[in-house]
């Protein structure tokens, strides 16, 4: 019988946002592969979830030390606030391998009591780059100070402490190459995301009559992308754009209101969003950050027709040949105009289905975890 400890930086149920989808859907896949999972979750607002018990041999919850109690001058806040002696003592009761979800969950790498244990860190992005991007995009001074300080501490931590892990598993090849080439962490491997079991490939051939940008519009950087698309790509452009997503600001609504060819759909249901993606001729998904892998890209590839992205969205994902790449407004206009003159062909559907179902095969990827962890 194979036993595995998994430490999650949050409670991974419900899988209702991008950061927890990989965490949650790994659990049923590993259970199916014969792994007895001992799950350890930091709880700070999501509550204890009985649903997790059906996939795990045991589930433990720990309070995160938020606020001043979680601050350290030498450790990143996201790590120091998850230091918990009860967790460490529970892990010391046996010698099972330990999988840490995110840099956030990796405090035990600082503890010599675990020096001979099999220790694996699942890296969801290059965390210090992500925090530096937040520093660049936020306008609030207090947040700017926090994000900048955290990015510096994370860079030092990633470089020094992560080298104590036996293995690092990244979500993109780009991140794998970064940890190998920049930090000399040679024990780094690419492991694709675990996706929902009910994600069925449903892209179909044909034509749509609009371009779609979909995102959580309450996130600053997504709002900035939406405004950039409206002002730089679709201003005086005779093709229709729909922007859809959660909680758009009044400022974004005002920016869109002056455009005859742009429509805003606020807070669409999951079913409505899926239909918008499916009916669009082009899913337009540029990004201002190049961290991790964007679930909205995978959603578009599974359900939509043409995808137009920039390098930040696609680099290192292995999905380059399923998308059209445009890195500036003029190239985007040219690419959109060209694609609107042709249907999405059945040959594109077949190629996309084969690549996606091979890369994001939960059962196969769970067997990889078993092979690497044990």
Image: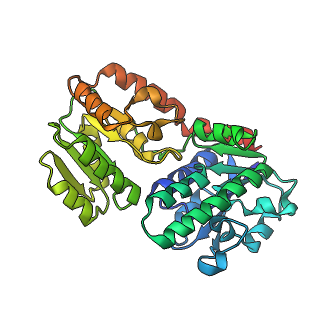
Residue drawn at the location 42% of the way across and 66% of the way down: 139
Q: Is residue 353 above or below residue 292?
A: above
Residue drawn at the location 61% of the way across and 38% of the way down: 365
Residue drawn at the location 63% of the way across and 55% of the way down: 102
Would you say residue 295 is visible in this rendering? yes
Q: Is residue 301 above or below residue 258?
A: above
Percent across and percent down for residue 10 are: 57, 64
Residue drawn at the location 44% of the way across and 46% of the way down: 295
Percent across and percent down for residue 288 are: 43, 47
- The quadrant of the picture occupied by the C terminus is top right
Residue that lies at the very extreme toward the left in this rendered image: 260
Residue that lies at the very extreme toward the top in this rendered image: 347
Foreground residue among 123 and 326: 326
Left or right of residue 69: residue 293: left
Q: Is residue 325 above or below residue 17?
A: above
Counting labels gives 0
Query: In the figure, residue 152 lies in which quadrant?
Result: bottom right
Rendered image coloring scheme: rainbow
Left or right of residue 8: residue 230: left
Left or right of residue 323: residue 227: left
Percent across and percent down for residue 189 are: 68, 38
Would you say residue 274 is visible in this rendering? no
Percent across and percent down for residue 123 are: 63, 49
Query: In the figure, residue 60 lies in which quadrant?
Result: bottom right
Foreground residue among 161 and 120: 161
Query: In the figure, residue 84 lies in which quadrant?
Result: bottom right
């Amino acid at each position: 019988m194979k036993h595995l400890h998994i430490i999650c930086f949050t409670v991974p149920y419900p899988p209702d946002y991008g950061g927890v989808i990989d965490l949650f859907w790994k659990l049923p896949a590993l259970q199916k592969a014969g792994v007895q999972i001992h799950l350890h979750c930091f709880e700070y607002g999501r509550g204890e979830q009985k649903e997790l018990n059906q996939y795990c041999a045991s589930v433990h919850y720990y309070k995160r030390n938020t606020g001043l109690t979680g601050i350290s001058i030498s450790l990143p806040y996201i790590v120091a606030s998850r230091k918990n002696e009860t967790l460490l003592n529970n892990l010391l009761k046996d010698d099972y391998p330990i999988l840490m979800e995110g840099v956030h969950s990796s405090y035990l790498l600082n503890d010599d009591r675990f020096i001979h244990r099999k220790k694996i860190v699942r890296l969801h992005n290059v965390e210090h780059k992500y925090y530096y991007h937040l520093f660049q995009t936020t306008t609030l001074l207090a947040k700017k100070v926090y994000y900048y300080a955290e990015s510096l501490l994370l860079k030092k931590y990633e470089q020094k402490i992560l080298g104590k892990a036996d293995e690092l598993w990244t979500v993109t090849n780009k991140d794998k190459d970064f940890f190998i080439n920049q930090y000399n962490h040679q024990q780094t491997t690419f492991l694709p995301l675990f996706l929902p079991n009910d994600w069925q490939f449903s892209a179909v051939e044909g034509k749509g009559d609009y371009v779609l940008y979909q995102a959580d519009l309450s996130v600053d950087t997504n709002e900035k992308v939406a405004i950039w698309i409206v002002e730089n790509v679709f201003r005086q452009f005779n093709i229709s754009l729909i922007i859809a997503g959660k909680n758009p600001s009044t400022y974004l609504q005002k920016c869109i209101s002056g455009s005859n060819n742009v429509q805003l759909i606020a807070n669409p249901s999951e079913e409505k969003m899926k239909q918008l993606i499916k009916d669009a001729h082009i899913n337009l998904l540029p990004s201002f950050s190049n961290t991790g892998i964007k679930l909205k890209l995978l959603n578009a590839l599974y359900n939509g027709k043409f995808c137009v992205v920039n390098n930040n969205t696609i680099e290192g994902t292995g999905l380059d040949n399923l998308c059209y790449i445009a890195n500036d407004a003029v190239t985007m206009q040219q690419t959109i105009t060209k694609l609107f003159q042709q249907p999405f062909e059945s040959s594109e559907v077949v190629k996309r289905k084969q690549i996606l179902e091979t890369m994001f095969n939960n059962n196969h990827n769970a067997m990889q975890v078993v092979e690497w962890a044990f």
